[in-house]
């Protein structure tokens, strides 16, 4: 640092402070997040003061009301024009309130509400002396197989802490795609990641596998967060600010004020390229793109299935929203640098996810690699770098999230003596044993495959059309080939369910509670409505596809 810069810092620090302005917080514009955070805090107090037998009912009611109220607040903001004409920056420049943010927040809240229904599913458990239990550990602090855990299982205990953890995760996800500066982005990342790490370790059955999955997710997530934070530091050195608008101005060369303390580093392209790449790597980890996908199959398999469904849907929505805002608002001037890289990532993600899925014998691992392939399809829309690209990604994320939660909700119903029967061989003949459940799962698989008259077809058509119009026609060809490969393993499962003989010792299909039936029903309804009549929702995504700057 030069002597002039040191002198500038010293004299600035020595200036008397005449007035400290109170922060200006637009509470109304932040109401969806504040509602969820408030309910999460109340949920923590419920764990402390409400008797154990009543906690489940209080937590489910509190969480459902909070998520529904937050969604109503999002709708009210959109109806008041904040998605279009009144879009702006709230919380002293930290959070954007615009069309993409509100659309994604609404999707996350609805996905969280539907995911909550799967969290709240309770079924009779012989080991719990006839008590109804959920998918989570009887007592999270107990060592697996210990006497204290066995006593908690017999007593029918449940880990109701998952409900405030779910709300904290949703709160972080609401901020993540709306963050308008790098520090807010990082804080939101940690707010929703930490609850997910915890919830992944709380499976009632196969606890050691669940804890192994959580440790893998935590360690790899910590590395991804470290890369993100280091990238933020480099971008701050490049632009002298963490604000998206200021960084974009420095990238475009329109900035007029130079911080004397950073005069030696501001405008250094090496800092920009390395820092931007590190942040993008952290976001690609969250969406499960190749080569940052290695955690996905193990975590999806080991985590409690309701957590897997929620994480596969809502995390992808939030992470792609943050990636869109970073590339379209902060780094549009570098599109000729990051587009070729994204081309490569999209291609290996689509092909890698589809090809490796063919070799899987576990239904949850198969859906994990399916999720990886879908991340590649969504990246095709991101690469378009057009308003249609943004709107197509928004629509795809909305369609994909409900199909995913519905599919994992069906997985929770197929059970044997060891819990959920996830090996594909145990699904043989399921269509004969339980035709309705198999038919519903087949609908979800056809949507994943992108078969016409399903939401998956409408979403893929939208992103491929935007990519082709954005100059990425070869990428669309790769996407179509990947979709054809992926269709093979989806149809293989359908054939296994309907055209194979059921095994005598095969699993049973649990009778779902009204909550799980609602989650599955919403998934089927969204799949068919968005597939048969998608135009209204495509128009809604088009109206919401403009970022505020």
Image (tube, rainbow, N blue to C red):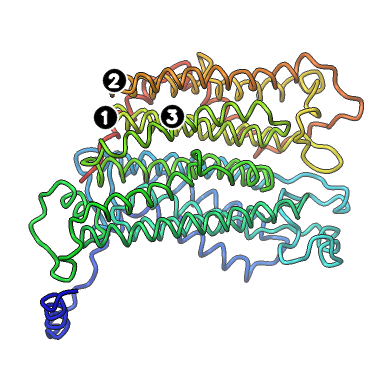
Where residue 506 sits: x, y (%)? 86, 29
- Name the foreground residue: 226 vs 273: 273
Other-residue count near label 1 (Cα within 10 Å), few / some / many at <14 / 14–19 / ≥20: some
Q: From this view, report whether residue 44 is shown above or below residue 444.
A: below
Determine the residue positioned at 58% across, 36% down. Answer: 405
Q: From this view, report whether residue 67 is shown above or below residue 430.
A: below
Please give the residue where the numbered disc 1 appears in the rendered image.
Answer: 386
Determine the residue positioned at 76% across, 66% down. Answer: 142
| Cα gap from disc 2 to disc 1, whole angstroms | 9 Å
| Cα gap from disc 3 to disc 1, whole angstroms | 15 Å
- C-beta proximity under 8 Å, tags 2 and 1: yes
Q: Secondary structure at mark 3?
A: helix
Point out the residue furthest to the left here: 256
Point out the residue furthest to the right here: 504
- C-beta proximity under 8 Å, tags 3 and 2: no
Residue 80 seen anywhere in this rendered image of the structure: no
- Name the foreground residue: 361 vs 158: 361
| Cα gap from disc 3 to disc 2, whole angstroms | 17 Å
Q: From this view, report whether residue 190 is shown above or below residue 317.
A: below
Q: Secondary structure at mark 1?
A: loop
Where residue 73 sits: x, y (%)? 37, 47
Please give the residue where the numbered disc 2 appears in the rendered image.
Answer: 469
Closer to the N terminus: mark 3 or mark 1?
A: 1
Using residue 47 as the reference point, say whether residue 249 is left or right of it. Answer: left
Please give the residue where the numbered disc 3 appears in the rendered image.
Answer: 396
Foreground label between 3 and 2? 2
Determine the residue positioned at 51% across, 50% down. Answer: 65
Closer to the N terminus: mark 3 or mark 2?
A: 3
Foreground label between 3 and 1? 1
Quarter of the image where one finds residue 103: top left
Q: Secondary structure at mark 2?
A: helix
């Amino acid at each position: 640092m030069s002597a002039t810069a040191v002198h500038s810092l010293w004299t600035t620090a020595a200036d008397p402070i005449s007035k400290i302005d109170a922060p200006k917080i637009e509470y109304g514009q932040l109401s969806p997040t504040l509602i969820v955070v408030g309910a999460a805090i109340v949920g923590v107090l419920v764990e402390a003061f409400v008797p154990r037998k009543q906690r489940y009912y209080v937590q489910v009611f509190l969480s459902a009301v909070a998520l529904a109220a937050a969604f109503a607040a999002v709708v009210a903001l959109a109806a008041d024009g904040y998605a279009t004409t009144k879009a702006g920056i709230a919380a002293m420049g930290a959070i954007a309130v615009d069309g993409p943010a509100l659309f994604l927040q609404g999707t996350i809240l609805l996905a969280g509400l539907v995911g909550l229904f799967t969290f709240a599913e309770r079924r009779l458990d012989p080991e719990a002396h006839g008590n109804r239990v959920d998918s989570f550990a009887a007592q999270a602090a107990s060592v697996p197989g210990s006497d204290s855990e066995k006593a908690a299982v017999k007593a029918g205990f449940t880990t109701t802490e998952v409900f405030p953890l779910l709300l904290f995760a949703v709160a972080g996800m609401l901020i993540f795609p709306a963050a308008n500066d790098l520090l807010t982005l990082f804080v939101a990342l940690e707010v929703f990641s930490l609850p997910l790490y915890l919830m992944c370790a709380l499976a009632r059955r196969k606890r050691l596998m669940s804890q192994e999955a959580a440790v893998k997710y935590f360690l790899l997530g910590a590395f991804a967060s470290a890369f993100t934070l280091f990238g933020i530091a480099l971008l701050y050195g490049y632009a002298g600010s963490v604000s998206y608008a200021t960084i974009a101005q420095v990238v475009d060369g329109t900035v007029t004020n130079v911080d004397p303390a950073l005069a030696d580093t501001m405008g250094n392209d090496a800092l920009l390229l390395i820092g931007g790449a590190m942040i993008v790597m952290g976001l690609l980890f969250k969406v499960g793109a190749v080569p940052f996908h290695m955690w996905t199959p193990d975590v999806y398999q080991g985590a409690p299935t309701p957590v897997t469904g929620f994480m596969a849907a809502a995390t992808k929505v939030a992470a792609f929203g943050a990636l869109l805002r970073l590339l379209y608002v902060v780094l549009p001037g570098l599109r000729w640098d990051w587009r070729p890289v994204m081309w490569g990532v999209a291609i290996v993600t689509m092909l890698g996810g589809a090809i490796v899925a063919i070799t899987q014998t576990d239904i949850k691992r198969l859906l994990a690699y399916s999720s990886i392939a879908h991340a590649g399809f969504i990246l095709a829309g991101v690469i378009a770098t057009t308003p249609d690209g943004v709107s197509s990604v928004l629509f795809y994320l909305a369609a994909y999230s409900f199909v995913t939660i519905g599919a994992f909700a069906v997985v929770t119903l197929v059970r044997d003596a060891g819990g959920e029967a996830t090996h594909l061989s145990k699904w043989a003949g399921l269509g004969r044993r339980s035709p309705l459940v198999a038919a519903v799962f087949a609908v979800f698989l056809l949507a994943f495959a992108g078969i016409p008259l399903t939401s998956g077809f409408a979403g893929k058509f939208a992103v491929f059309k935007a990519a082709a119009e954005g100059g990425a026609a070869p990428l669309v060809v790769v996407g179509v080939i990947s979709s054809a490969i992926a269709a093979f393993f989806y149809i293989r499962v359908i054939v296994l369910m309907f055209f194979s003989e059921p095994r005598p010792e095969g699993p049973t299909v649990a009778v779902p509670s009204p909550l799980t039936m609602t989650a599955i029903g919403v998934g089927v309804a969204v799949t068919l409505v968005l597939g048969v009549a998608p135009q209204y929702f495509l128009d809604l995504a088009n109206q919401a596809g403009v970022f505020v700057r």
